[in-house]
Amino acid sequence: MPLSPYSRAQQARQELANRLAELRREAGLTGRELARRCGWHPSKSSRLENARTPPTAEDITAWCGACGARDRAGDLIASLRAAEGMWTEWRRMERSGLRQAQVNRLPLYERTQRFRSYSSWLVPGLLQTRSYTTAVLEAVQRRRGLVDDVAEAVDARIDRQRVLHQGNRRFAFLVEESVLRAGVGGTQVMTGQLAALIAAGSLPNVSIGIVPSTPDRERWPVEGFWIYDAAQVNVELVSGYLTVTAPSEVASYAATFSELAECAVHGTAARTLITAALNALDRPGYR
């Protein structure tokens, strides 16, 4: 059975840890001796070798120096960067605030020509209104206790939406029907967002499919993901941000997208579901 992308990220970290352990053994050092040469607590050597703590580039440089193998540091640091690129925890990605996390994605959007997005939680960022984005990012900022740069982060995300109107890019969005009724930001915010979703569907380079909430569907909802051309997939999970570049795994997400697209309704039928959600906002009890 093939490993999941998250498992592959863990495996890459373990392989790096194994290489550090092998380097120590080749040098004839115990973990305690290596720690003394590096100037850190012996338990750190154990945590690094068992992949319980990911090393920094500085850790790797010190480790290689202690083992008399400074020439090996470059390759090991490259392996570290590859492992880091596969999986990034939100707290690490957003440690300087939300704005930078938004800005960092812009080059990927600018070089992509074909976008495929599936969302089971929220309206996709490229289709969000300013008020919806503000409600989402304010909630993230409060929940994670981040620096309050929400206004700047909103500007960065809205600016990124210009790719919808530049060049010959194509966009296919799949959204679970439950997203239309999620109630982000309250009635006024959702009213504007659903109206904007209908308007976006009229763009000639944009396809919007709604996956109906039916009791007999055979393809269940999965985590939200983006496919950029056929080169990369990004997946947003509760604890972090996953990057997938292995061709077989990108193909797996592409196949899942196609299966979900077959479950979705498009065109007039999609607008009908969005309009129904819009009309439901006027019902008593909706906040």
Image (spheres, rainbow, N blue to C red):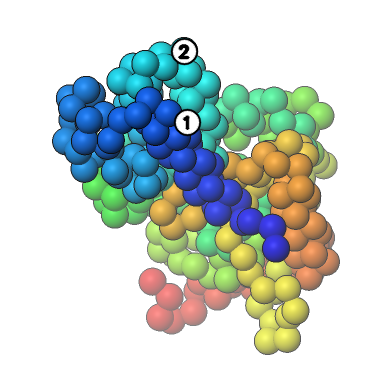
Question: What's the CA distance linking mark 1 and mark 2?
Answer: 16 Å
Q: Secondary structure at mark 2?
A: helix
Q: Residues within 10 Å of mark 2 (few under 14, many from 20)?
A: few
Residue 75 in percent (x, y) is at 52, 21
Within the image, what quadrant is residue 26 found in? top left
Within the image, what quadrant is residue 252 found in? bottom right
Residue placed most toward the observer, 166 or 236: 236
Q: Amino acid at mark 2?
A: Asp
Q: In the drawing, what numbered circle is on residue 71?
A: 2
Q: Note whether 195 is above or below 162 in the view shown.
A: below
Residue 182 in percent (x, y) is at 49, 67
Residue at x-position 78% and y-position 70%: 263
Residue 162 in percent (x, y) is at 63, 30
Q: Note whether 135 is above or below 64 in the view shown.
A: below
Residue at x-position 77% and y-position 25%: 167
Q: Secondary structure at mark 1?
A: helix
Q: In the drawing, what numbered circle is on residue 80?
A: 1
Q: Residues within 10 Å of mark 1 (few under 14, many from 20)?
A: many
